[in-house]
Image: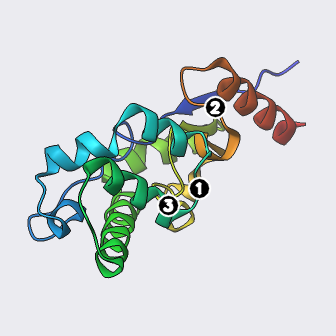
Amino acid sequence: MLKKKVIFFDLFYTLITPQYYLDRNENDVINLTTDEWETFAEDIELYLRRATGKVKDEVQIIEEIISKSGLSVTSNEKEEILKLRKNRMEVALTNIDKTVYEVLSQLKKRKFKLCIISNADSIDVASWEKSPLYALFDDAVFSYEVGYVKPQPQIYEIALKRLQNNMD
């Protein structure tokens, strides 16, 4: 019996790294530093709510981060924050490091099955299908879609089962 070769990858800070820009970012809309913004955005309770899909609505995600900051923000500011965050993530997903792309392409040529397992919310991966990586992967398991985050074993079990079903 031939064994299938599968490699699992994390997406963020492994294959891509979302960068803050020099000009304008989410935090600039409400006059916070990037560190302050990240403190609120990565608050463990909020992070788990969106990363496990308990909150999928993009506007609600932004509202919960802003709420954690205690700041009063207008509707226009919320819209701008969301737009800037989505754009920042899209840039990270579409501007792939050449070496990363080449290595993944070589793995595909060698008949490896490739799968992403990533803790992500709906904003983080809204542009996944626009990414050059999209076509290289046989599947992508995003935590907000399946309700589990790494290192919970269920997210790995889901990935294995989905890949196994794709190989039959």
> Is the residue 68 above or below the residue 128 in the image?
above
Closer to the camera in the image, 32 or 140: 32
Q: Is residue 138 visible?
A: no
Q: Real-space Cα distance between discs 1 and 3?
A: 8 Å
> Is the residue 80 above or below the residue 91 in the image?
below
* Residue located 19% across and 69% down the image: 29
Q: Position of residue 131 (x, y in %)?
A: 48, 62
Name the image quarter holding residue 159. Answer: top right
* Residue occupying the far bottom of the picture: 76
The residue wearing badge 2 is 148
57 with respect to 24 (left or right): right
Mark 1 is surrounded, within 10 Å at the Cα level, by few (under 14), some (14 to 19) or many (20 or more) other residues, namely: some
Q: Position of residue 72 (x, y in %)?
A: 26, 65
The residue wearing badge 1 is 56
Q: Earlier in the sequence, mark 2 or mark 3?
A: 3
Closer to the camera in the image, 142 or 110: 142
The residue wearing badge 3 is 60
Mark 2 is surrounded, within 10 Å at the Cα level, by few (under 14), some (14 to 19) or many (20 or more) other residues, namely: many
**Secondary element type, mark 3:** helix
68 with respect to 137 (left or right): left
User: What kind of residue is marked 2?
Assistant: Tyr
Q: Quadrant of the N terminus?
A: top right
Q: Quadrant of the C terminus?
A: top right
Closer to the camera in the image, 92 or 6: 92
User: What kind of residue is marked 1?
Assistant: Lys
Q: Position of residue 76 (x, y in %)?
A: 32, 81
Q: Real-space Cα distance between discs 2 and 3?
A: 20 Å
Closer to the camera in the image, 32 or 87: 32
Query: Which label lies toward us, 2 or 1?
Result: 1
* Residue located 10% across and 52% down the image: 33
User: What kind of residue is marked 3?
Assistant: Gln
